[in-house]
Amino acid sequence: MIEFLKIAYRKLRSFYHRIKLYYSVNWIKTIYFNFKKFPLSIAVKLPVFFYGKVTFQSLKGEVIINAPIKRGMIGYGQRFELFKKEKGVAEIFLHGKLVFNGNMHIGKDVSIYVGENAYCEFGYMSCLGSDVKIICINKIKIGDWARIGYESQIVDTNSHPMKNSLTGEDIPMTAPIHIGTHNSISNRVSIRLNTRTPDYCVIGSNTLCNKDYTNLGSNILLGGVPAKLIKKEYTRDWDKERELLEDFLIII
């Protein structure tokens, strides 16, 4: 009986959450984006939902979904965190290629910039918290189940020409970023060009990542400015959280 009540409660909560999400969708932006970026056979399924205010600075680029198409499988502007109020400053600038490998959840006030010929890829059940900024001039790949905390930034460019002041040698302005699978990235983390993280990696708040950390192995905690190894055999308990996340972050 107790197990039956638990299942019934979860189904009721799921139904309530679906209805609440449905009525919070920005239908004008949702319909416009889907029919502009996808073939008719995909667009009519409305795989990308927008919630709240979002500005489309440019949508000249390409959007690809490498997964079975479901309605609302990608949610942009969702209120799944503790604080619900939005500032209404979310923006998308797309001139390159934006790829989704399945369901994804994007919080409030997130800005994504994908420049000309740039490539930005999000894995299955990846997540961007509120106020996250993505600036992709070269290449950014974010693995499955990588969760990026609020007010973090992922930027693959220096934005300005840099050089070695002693030798005069030019420093590359851009370089790829690769975030591994099952990464738990805390709030206000800065991920810079040349960053590579291993699978099953936790990154502490206010950390600066700027190099390849894959040689440190999996199940590690990184932290500091710049990031360094803080602890081994440390990981988010994904087995306990997976069912909760898949249940709470509902696809309509």
Image (cartoon, rainbow, N blue to C red):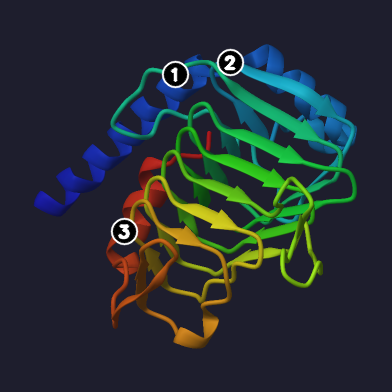
- Front residue of 109/247: it is 109
Quarter location, residue 217? bottom left
- Front residue of 236/226: it is 226
N-terminal of the pair, mark 2 or mark 1, is: 2
Label 2 residue SS: loop
Residue type pointed to by label 1: Glu
- In the picture, measured across the screen, residue 153 lies left or right of residue 34, that is left
Residue at horizontal 81 percent and vertical 38 percent from the top? 42
The numbered mark at residue 241 is 3
The reply to whether the C-beta atoms of the residues labelled 2 and 1 are less than 8 Å apart is yes
Residue type pointed to by label 3: Glu
* Residue found farthest to the front: 166
- Front residue of 194/110: it is 194
Whether residue 17 appears in this view of the structure is yes
| Residue 31 in the image: above or below residue 186 | above
* Image coordinates for residue 251, horizontal then vertical, percent: 52, 39
Q: Which residue is mark 1?
A: 86
N-terminal of the pair, mark 3 or mark 1, is: 1
Label 1 residue SS: loop
* Image coordinates for residue 137, horizontal then vertical, percent: 78, 49
Q: Which residue is mark 2?
A: 53
Please rate how many residues cluster around mark 1, counting C-alpha atoms within 10 Å: few if below 14, some from 14 to 19, many from 20. Answer: some
